[in-house]
Amino acid sequence: MRKVLSLLLCVGIALVVSSTAFAQSAPPATGPNLTIGLVMVGPYNDHGWSQANYEGVQYVTSKLPGTKMVYIDRANTADRPGTTVSQLGESLVAQGAKLVIFSSDDMTDEAIKFAEDHPDIFVILTSGSQQWKDGKNYLPLPNMVNVMGKMEYMKMVAGVAAAMTTKTGKIGFLGPLINDETRRLASAAYLGARYAWVNYLKKDPSKLTFKVTWIGFWFNIPGVTSDPTQVADDFFNSGFDVVISGIDTTEAVAEAAKFTAQGKKVWAMPYDYDKALEEGKGVSLGVPYFNWGPAYLRIIKSAMDGTWKNHFEWNDPDWKNINNRDTSAVGFMKGALSKEASDAVDKFIGELGKGLNLWVGPLNYQDGSVFLKKGEKATDQQIWYLPQLLQGMEGQSVSK
């Protein structure tokens, strides 16, 4: 009897160990045939964040024979009340997906739940940091990768374009919801604008106004968010002549075109998607955009060939050519810039490529407390988890 009990105990321990080992392993390689699932927060053709992700996966399927995409867009509570993001991921698995991309930071909790519930499915979570060993929210999941492009650089470029163009010295930033990501991107735009204002135009930084107005989400949801059209109008009606958009849709550019048609000289910049520049020609100064294709291709290849490792990546531009579709994670397409502004943008990009760092003190937070002492350089963690806007910026730093 004791031998039987001992044998059963050994078998039980072996099963536990085996189960634990499996749970700590990446899923098996998919091989050459792979269905890729994509969950998008907005419409797949929004001329913004979601479309940039959609076309990023299209890039992958064009490069890897045997791959195909299935997708669900409008994954938000307004468009799909009562349905969770993890449930949407499961519906893609039911369509054959062995890898699912959750393409928005606000999907984080549901993406983690999905990854934990489906250890046999590869998961990519864009803009999250759970697989960052040096991050605040490290939660190792063997089947998850976090990926983001260093858009901060391109928002700085947008700030330079705005500062070189404004005639009133008043730049507006049309922001989405408030979180670490959106604070650091708005702050990066401000740093770029201030740098050009002081170093290229030789003007007093106290004469530059940079105001952020948040609408409450990545795009307009009637009855839930502020109306981005109205926010853009409010900027233009109160002397702001350049609006940098931080939302997924193009209302700022549309309103700039409307005001220009009425005889006002105003400009705007869309966000996320390179072809958004095609809207509002003559008033769109340029667009900072994401190019998801190269990162998605590299990560998805690793799922196919068995080299997958859970990790976090925050990818730089290709400074040799920030608009190289095969190599650069982010880019900036120039639009209706004056020659002086265009030259300044080119000069600034060149300086960034040679190591210019605007995240250097002295810099204070918006409430006056010290962010970086004189000469101190921000760490990646300090930038990623930026808790406030910077001193010199107007607007909310935290949600009320």
Image (cartoon, helix red, strand yellow):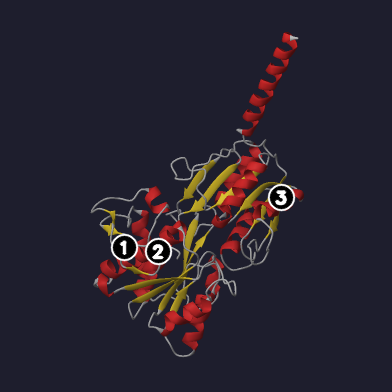
Q: Is residue 282 visible?
A: no
Q: Nearer the viewer, residue 173 or 7?
A: 7
Q: Nearer the viewer, residue 371 or 346?
A: 371
Q: Mark 2: which secondary structure?
A: loop
* 309 relative to 360, above or below: above
* 323 relative to 3, above or below: below
Q: Which mark is residue 367?
A: 1
Q: Nearer the viewer, mark 1 or mark 3?
A: 1
The kind of residue tagged 3 is Glu
Of the numbered discs 2 and 1, the one sitting upstream in the chain is 1
Q: Position of residue 69 (x, y in %)?
A: 70, 54
Crowding at dot 3, Cα within 10 Å, few <14 / some 14-19 / many 20+, comes out as: some
Image marks 2 and 1: residues in contact by CB distance under 8 Å: yes
The kind of residue tagged 2 is Ser
Determine the residue positioned at 39% across, 79% down.
240
Of the numbered discs 3 and 2, the one sitting upstream in the chain is 3
Is 191 placed left or right of 174 in the picture? left
Q: Which mark is residue 90?
A: 3
Determine the residue positioned at 48% across, 60% down.
331
Point out the image quarter for the C terminus: bottom left
Q: Work out how far the residue at label 3 is from the one at label 2, CA to CA, in angstroms.
A: 36 Å
Q: Position of residue 268 (x, y in %)?
A: 46, 75
The kind of residue tagged 1 is Asp
Residue to which mark 2 is pinned: 397
Crowding at dot 2, Cα within 10 Å, few <14 / some 14-19 / many 20+, comes out as: many
Determine the residue positioned at 42% across, 52% down.
384
Q: Quadrant of residue 299?
A: top right
Point out the image quarter for the N terminus: top right
Is 210 placed left or right of 92 in the picture? left
* 255 relative to 400, above or below: below
Q: Position of residue 54 (x, y in %)?
A: 63, 59
